[in-house]
């Protein structure tokens, strides 16, 4: 593999590999660590999601590194650390599927043919003509200034956070979509969103519940990750390995997120339907024209590293949502065995982030993983259990 290079002046990311190394096959192999003994069983490993299953911190020029840990009951935990600038969720699952095919002895001509031609994301070359509030352009601090800031403002000064999985059974998924679909659109209201998905409804629900649990009483902006592979025109080729996640932005006033005095524990069907349609509308806006304009906007920046997500979700009022659904989470097969669980490790301090995934072991339903400050998390868990639209 080549080296990850990020230009300090422009923020442009590239992979450096000489022609001679490609021809001779002497390019650097990914770092692979092993731990041949641990006291944890597979079930315990799934519950703990320990950072110990991850490899040592990836170097600045490393594209990817891996750690394999043999579990006490014969299971195997594989921790992969890859540059998110080059891999998104679907790219990672594609990589794992190909890895499994290689492990199983599938001939190269019969394996998935991956594509990582980064020129396919170069856009049209035309100037940007649209507004892009999903981003903010910030001033880049020098390395010395950032190190000084990190020294005086350590993560340990932040409140403790927790990670919890909220499971939705198929019946719960059906209920939440029905409630959101049948309500929330006034007769005189015009919207591009003629329908809402189950994930739209779940996004709307957790936007309300988390905002109430945080108790800040402020307006909320949410970022929804959009997989643009099939939204671009022409669409990207199958098995494209790269980061093709764009951001959809939707905004909600403090008043519409609050509960009514007579039913503080509930989220009204009208609120759920209205917010779910706004989520869907923000996603529909990200068509090929908008996405190409987004690429133009990014390439016009003098330093692409200065472009940040436009929401203040980390201990702020806002939220970030992403989904790993329909990405082949459990497609990888190693000698007839599929993964039981794919997830991010337990982060020591992370807040305001929601990840929607397929259920463990490829089971029915989906899981909604929430990273949140501990006090707010306790309120969220209680509120979720009291929702009559899901549990009655």
Image (cartoon, rainbow, N blue to C red):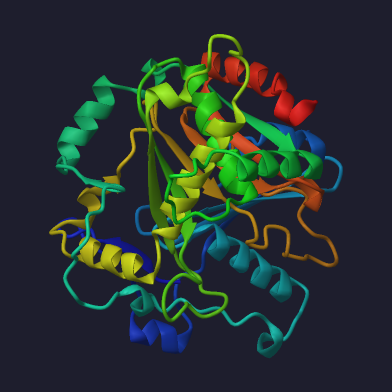
At 72% from the left and 86% from the top, the residue drawn is: 107
Residue 301, image quadrant? bottom left
> Which sits in the foreground, 227 or 103?
227
Residue shown at the point (46%, 29%) measured from the top left = 351
Residue 344 appears anywhere in the view? no
Quarter of the figure with the C terminus? top right
Query: Residue 94 location in percent, x, y?
Result: 61, 68
Decide which of 85, 190 is in the foreground and name it.
190
Residue 16 percent location from the top left of the image: 32, 72
Task: Identify which residue is drawn at 74% across, 30% down.
Answer: 390
What x and y, as percent, mark residue 197? 61, 51
- Which image quadrant for residue 391? top right
Residue 235 in sight in this render: yes
Q: Is residue 51 above or below residue 128?
A: above
Up-down: is 161 above or below 27?
above
Q: Is residue 86 left or right of residue 104?
A: left
Can you give x and y, in whole percent of width and height, for residue 182 in the image? 64, 43
| Rendered residue at 63%/35% (across/down) | 50
Residue 123 sits above or below residue 299 on the image: below
In the image, is 251 to the left or to the right of 349? Answer: left
Identify the residue at the far top of this view.
261
């Amino acid at each position: 593999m080549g080296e990850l290079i990020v230009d300090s002046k422009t923020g442009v990311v590239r992979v450096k590999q000489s022609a001679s190394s490609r021809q001779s096959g002497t390019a650097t192999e990914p770092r692979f660590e092993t731990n041949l003994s641990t006291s944890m069983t597979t079930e315990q490993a799934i519950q703990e999601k320990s950072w110990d299953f991850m490899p040592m911190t990836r170097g600045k020029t490393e594209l990817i590194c891996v750690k394999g840990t043999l579990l006490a009951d014969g299971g195997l935990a594989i921790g992969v650390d890859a540059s998110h600038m080059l891999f998104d969720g679907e790219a990672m699952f594609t990589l794992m599927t190909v890895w499994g095919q290689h492990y199983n002895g599938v001939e190269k001509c019969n394996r998935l043919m991956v594509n990582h031609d980064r020129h396919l994301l170069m856009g049209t070359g035309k100037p940007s003509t649209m507004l892009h509030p999903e981003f903010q352009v910030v001033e880049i601090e020098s390395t010395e200034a950032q190190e000084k800031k990190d020294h005086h403002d350590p993560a340990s000064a932040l409140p403790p956070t927790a990670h919890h999985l909220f499971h939705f059974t198929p019946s719960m998924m059906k209920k939440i979509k029905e409630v959101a679909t049948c309500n929330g659109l006034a007769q005189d209201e015009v919207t591009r969103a003629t329908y809402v998905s189950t994930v739209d409804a779940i996004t709307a629900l957790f936007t309300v519940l988390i905002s109430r649990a945080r108790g800040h009483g402020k307006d909320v902006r949410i970022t929804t990750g959009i997989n643009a592979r099939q939204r671009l025109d022409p669409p990207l080729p199958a098995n494209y390995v790269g980061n093709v996640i764009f951001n959809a932005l939707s905004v909600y006033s403090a008043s519409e997120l609050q509960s009514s005095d007579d039913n503080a524990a509930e989220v009204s069907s009208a609120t759920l339907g209205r917010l779910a349609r706004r989520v869907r509308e923000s996603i529909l806006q990200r068509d090929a024209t908008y996405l190409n304009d987004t690429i133009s906007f990014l390439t016009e920046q003098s330093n692409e590293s200065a472009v940040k997500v436009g929401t203040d979700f980390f201990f702020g009022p806002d939220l970030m949502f992403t989904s790993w659904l329909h990405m082949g989470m459990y497609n990888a097969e190693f000698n007839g065995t599929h993964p039981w669980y794919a997830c991010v490790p337990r982060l020591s301090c992370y807040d305001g982030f929601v990840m929607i995934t397929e259920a463990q072991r490829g089971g029915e339903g989906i899981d909604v993983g929430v990273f949140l400050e501990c006090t707010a998390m306790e309120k969220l868990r209680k509120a979720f259990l009291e929702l009559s639209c899901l549990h009655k």
